[in-house]
Image (cartoon, helix red, strand yellow):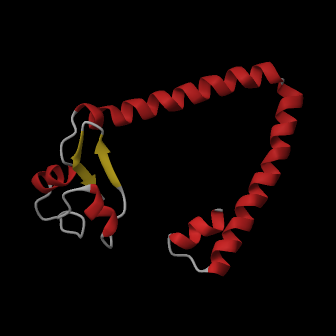
């Protein structure tokens, strides 16, 4: 499905297939690195290292997204106050549906407590 995803974001079919081939080739070659690591380091050590790495990554994501969850202010109005000269097609969007339906915008973050008070980028 990666070529379909790449086509949906604007790549033509030839570029999407070419990029997919690169992606799958890297994935195939990385398999041999994983096999070597399992044989030389050991399964148990790799399991512990993976657990520590994943836990650290999740902790970083938790810390990064915590302020947005605790303070679900409308990000667009926050940017408008902080940067009054910034313009763009996303600043006038007030909810997620108008954000993702509009051209030039496409990412909408919202708090589960208040879906109307969304951030459009």
In the image, residue 52 lies at what x, y percent? 61, 23
Vertical arrangement, residue 38 with respect to residue 115, above or below = above
Q: Quadrant of the N terminus?
A: bottom right
Tell whether 12 sits left or right of 107. right
Task: Please identify the quadrant where the C terminus is shown.
Answer: bottom left
Report whether 82 appears left or right of 109.
left
Q: Please give the name of the residue rendered at 73% of the width and 23% of the height, measured from the top-left corner.
A: 47
Task: Give x and y (percent) for residue 56.
Answer: 53, 27
Q: Position of residue 119 (x, y in %)?
A: 26, 52
From the viewer's side, name the closer residue of 74 and 23: 74
Q: Position of residue 49 (x, y in %)?
A: 68, 24
Left or right: 116 as drawn, with respect to 19: left
Residue in front for this viewpoint, 44 or 69: 69
**x 22%, y 39%: residue:** 72
Residue name at image x 57 percent, y 73 percent: 7
Query: Which residue is nearer to you in this view: 7 or 52?
Result: 7
Residue at horizontal 36%, vertical 57%? Answer: 107
Q: How many marks?
A: 0
Q: Please tell me in which quadrant of the rendered image residue 45 appears.
A: top right
Q: Is residue 82 left or right of residue 33?
A: left
């Amino acid at each position: 499905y990666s070529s379909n995803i790449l086509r949906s974001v604007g790549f033509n079919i030839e570029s999407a297939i070419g990029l997919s081939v690169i992606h799958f080739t890297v994935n195939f070659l990385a398999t041999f690195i994983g096999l070597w690591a399992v044989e030389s380091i050991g399964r148990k050590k790799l399991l512990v290292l993976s657990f520590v790495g994943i836990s650290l990554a999740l902790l970083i994501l938790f810390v990064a997204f915590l302020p947005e969850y605790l303070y679900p202010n409308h990000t667009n109005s926050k940017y408008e106050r902080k940067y009054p000269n910034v313009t763009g097609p996303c600043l006038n969007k007030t909810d997620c549906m108008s954000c993702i339906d509009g051209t030039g915008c496409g990412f909408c973050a919202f708090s589960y407590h208040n879906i109307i008070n969304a951030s459009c980028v």
